[in-house]
Amino acid sequence: MPIKTYREAINEALLQEMKKDENVVVIGEDVAGGAGTNGEQDAWGGVLGVTKGLLKHFGRERIIDTPITETAIMGMASGAALTGLRPVAELMFVDFMGVCFDQILNQTAKFRYMFGGKAVTPLTIRTMYGGGLRAASQHSQCLYPMFTHVPGIKVVLPSNPYDAKGLLIQSIRDNDPVIFMEHKNLYDTSGDVPDESYSIPFGEANFTREGKDLTFIAMGQTVEICNNVADTLKKEGKTCTVLDLRTLSPLDEDSILEAAEETGKIVIVDESYPRCNVATDISALICQKSFDSLKAGIKMVTPPHTPVPFSPPLEDLYLPSEEKVLNVAKEIL
Amino acid sequence: MQLNREELLKAYEGMCLIREFDDAVHYEFAADAMPGFVHLYVGEEASAMGICMNLNEKDTIASTHRGHGHCIAKGCDVNDMMKELYGKKDGICGGKGGSMHIADLSKGMLGANGIVGGGPPIVLGAALTYKTKKTNNVSVGFFGDGASNQGSISESMNMASVLKLPAIFVCEDNGYAESTAREYAVGGKILDRGKAFGLDSHEVDGDNFFEVYEAAKHVIDNARNGKGPALLHIKTSKVYGHFEGDAISYRTKEENERIKNDEDPLKIFKKKVIEAGLLELTQLENIENESKAKIKKAIQESKEAEFPNANDLLTDVYIKY
């Protein structure tokens, strides 16, 4: 199977869906780049090059560079989805939700319910999240719990190139609004990605490791951390399950409970702020529905309740790491 | 004057129906018969009808919290709307939206909106759909003088200008953002804000249906023909307060009297068409009586209609989940 990066997998999903359906348009800041200049067109292809090359296939009518105007971008994408297009809007960094959340929270997410089931809003919002690039407090957040909190939107966190392609294709074809979250640190990671088009259904978590002694529950970048820790522990004679949630909304509760019950020892690894995050939510779920299966208190590895720091040693202290996860796992093994 | 008798009658029918609808809601709300809160359009009818008579069924509008007039002008069914206001199962949104979220996509009505300045960004999207699919439709975003101070409006006007979208921005300036006067809250002129973004911008007397109609025709025809977005700044006034229950103590008695007596778009329309010999008084009075009867029936049916049930609570969040 061909090896592709996470970035290439996302690009290929967009290319294939745009070829398949002329209603798919890409909207965002510098998604091609160079608009209105005398220099190179498609100069950037997105700030980290994810949409590079689409311009030559689809032109500026479908690869739409916008001003820096997130409210108008999210509103335009929502209105376009409501009236017959299938837009993929880019929110360059998820941190910028602060300037456009109304259009997501109060408009798109609620159209269907408020309008009595008549609205169809096939909108995909692609956005970058996560720390590790020394990008400091306003360009490193996760924030996916805030979207997960809101009924009416689906929240997708691909952890590897294969999932990135299949889940993005599913996001574009899905008729509900979807926020598709790409961890910046994953763009250069590679893996097997078929050339042909395929989709991965939402709400189906993926068991990336299976074991008997402990269960890691992870999402996005933390899946790779947990896989590596599980491999380390295996050498020490302990087998672990790793469950990659893939989508936070819908949430695959059955697989979570199954994974929890198999081992009775749970470590949830979540890069988002520790209060009201995915780890606390899943912990509550397991406690409510599967308390008797627990053999130890549920453990969580998250950052501290602080903004993301800039200085490299501070950011390293802040982020979940293999070392931290391993130490926490050993506390209950 | 380009309107024929049939169109003039349609204009008056629409304005009367809006007037009767919101007057009736005013009394029902005061009698504690209606849940939630409502914002009434009485006094601004010429704006909705003057704009929407230039639109076809595939054109779209996005409205405001003061949206009943826009809904009626765009063809939403008044029975279904009234049932929605009472929170009934057969309401236009199944009782899940209420006054501030009335929508009928089949009529090109993309929703009233509970967020001040929420609609115009959505209108950009409808306009982008028309531009991309090369239909010659337009989309109209209504907002108030209060919303003119929201960043969403500035962002929308700029985006429409940059992408040359068939989007029309209609600022219905009734002089008050809640209890705060335009003179206090708007820096500079609303008209100049449109001009600053390169929009074809016009100030219009919103009490005069004919002036609104002509201005709307000009900018909507242009937008249909690929000439880009425009701003209409419609000076109008509302008879009732921000919401029902507002004592309007921030307005003087004289101002309230002037709005009712001298700035009533229905009276002004009636006087003009009769003096010009375009329509007869009896025709207009018939329309008034028919509107009253329609709304009376709508209220009666709405009161008798069923509420949604427990199963309805959980439906329509997602299409598939």
Image (cartoon, rainbow, N blue to C red):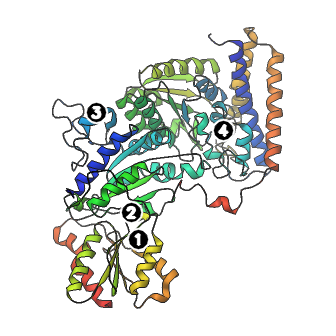
Question: Who's the residue at 79% across and 24% down the image?
Answer: B287
- The reply to whether residue A98 is in sight is no
**Quarter of the figure with the N terminus of chain A:** bottom left
Q: Are marks 1 and 3 on the same chain?
A: yes
The one of A280 and B24 positioned closer to us in this rendering? A280
Cβ atoms at labels 2 and 1 below 8 Å apart = yes
A286 versus A108 height, above or below: below
B114 versus A233 height, above or below: above
Question: What distance separates the C-alpha of mark 4 from that of mark 1?
Answer: 41 Å
Q: Earlier in the sequence, mark 1 or mark 3?
A: 3
Tell me the residue that label 2 is attached to.
A144
Side of A39 where B259 appears, left or right: right
Query: Residue A169 at x, y = what percent?
Result: 36, 51
Rendered image: mark on residue B60:
none
Question: What distance separates the C-alpha of mark 3 from that of mark 2?
Answer: 32 Å
* Front position among marks 3 and 2: 3
Tell me the residue that label 3 is attached to.
A59
Type of amino acid under label 3: Gly
Crowd class of label 3 (few under 14; some 14 to 19; many from 20; radius 10 Å): few
Tell me the residue that label 1 is attached to.
A278
Secondary structure of the residue carrying numbered label 4: helix
